């Protein structure tokens, strides 16, 4: 699995040129991309690259790997964003947010000229919600009300708990995460909008219609899917 992640990360580097502003995704797959990008900058194979991190994780890793970082309000445009995903459907709609970084990821990736997604073949699904719940970032005071309101969509939601912290995890933005299990998400774009209409929801992990290219790591090599 790690080999497949490395393979797609390497493939994503082929889309990178000098003078680019790159959205740096979060998670274990993108981590390889950030480290490889750092190496290319160190050897001089790439120049004048700036990364816009989508989380504390990607910011710290970028700094450690020698990738200079800037924030969204310092740039006019983002050339490319590169990130992992938890599910990809046949129309390249995604579920993201296992790492709780979905809000900043969507802010950056929505605005990127090209959004490239890196996954291994186990993430490909027939419909969203097949394997994983939809992470929803919520304002802490509203978590219980939102959990109950999600029943309208036949979803059962759990407050995500910390592992090396007592109580719920706190996102980079100071909020909670509800993981909402749906039976089947028939219309991802509609569901994405509906969820964001609930007062107290900051953002949800459905990324409908924004991925341009999905690079899929398979045992036979990297497959490129395009929308
Ligand atoms: O919040 C986390 C992100 O959405 C990740 O990009 C996603 O969970 C994929 O992570 P990984 O590449 O580690 O499977």
Image: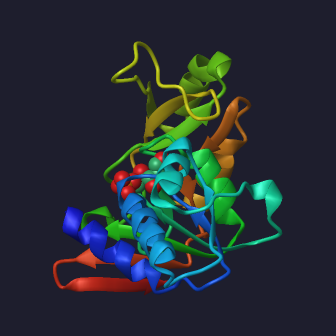
Q: Is residue 155 visible?
A: no
| Residue 142: percent from left, percent from top | 65, 20
Q: Is residue 19 left or right of residue 99?
A: right
The image's colouring method is rainbow
Residue beneath the point at 44% across and 14% down: 167
Asked if 82 appears above or below 58 in the picture, the reply is: below
Residue beneath the point at 83% across and 69% down: 76
Q: Is residue 51 left or right of residue 125?
A: right
| Residue 12: percent from left, percent from top | 44, 78
Q: Quadrant of residue 50?
A: bottom right
Give whichever of 195, 29 is nearer the camera: 29
Residue beneath the point at 68% across and 81% down: 19
Q: Is residue 62 left or right of residue 72?
A: left
Q: Is residue 170 visible?
A: yes
| Residue 91: percent from left, percent from top | 48, 75
Q: Quadrant of residue 120?
A: bottom left
């Amino acid at each position: 699995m790690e080999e497949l992640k490395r393979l797609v990360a390497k493939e994503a580097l082929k889309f990178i040129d000098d003078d680019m502003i790159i959205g740096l995704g979060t998670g274990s797959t993108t981590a390889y991309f950030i480290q490889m990008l750092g190496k290319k900058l160190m050897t001089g194979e790439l120049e004048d690259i700036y990364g816009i991190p989508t989380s504390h994780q990607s910011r710290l890793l970028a700094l450690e790997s020698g990738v200079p970082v800037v924030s969204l309000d310092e740039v006019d445009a983002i050339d490319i964003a590169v990130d992992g995903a938890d599910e990809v459907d046949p129309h390249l709609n995604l579920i993201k947010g296992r790492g709780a970084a979905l809000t900043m990821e969507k802010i950056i990736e929505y605005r990127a000229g090209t959004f490239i997604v890196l996954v291994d073949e186990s993430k490909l699904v027939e419909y969203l919600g097949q394997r994983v719940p939809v992470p929803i970032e919520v304002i802490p005071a509203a978590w219980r009300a939102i959990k109950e309101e999600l029943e309208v969509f036949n979803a059962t939601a759990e407050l995500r708990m910390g592992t090396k912290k007592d109580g719920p995890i706190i996102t980079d933005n100071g909020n909670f995460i509800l993981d909402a299990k749906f039976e089947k998400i028939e219309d991802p774009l509609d569901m994405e909008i509906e969820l964001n209409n609930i007062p107290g929801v900051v953002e949800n992990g459905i990324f409908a219609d924004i991925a341009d290219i999905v690079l899929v790591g398979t045992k036979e090599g990297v497959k490129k899917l395009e929308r």
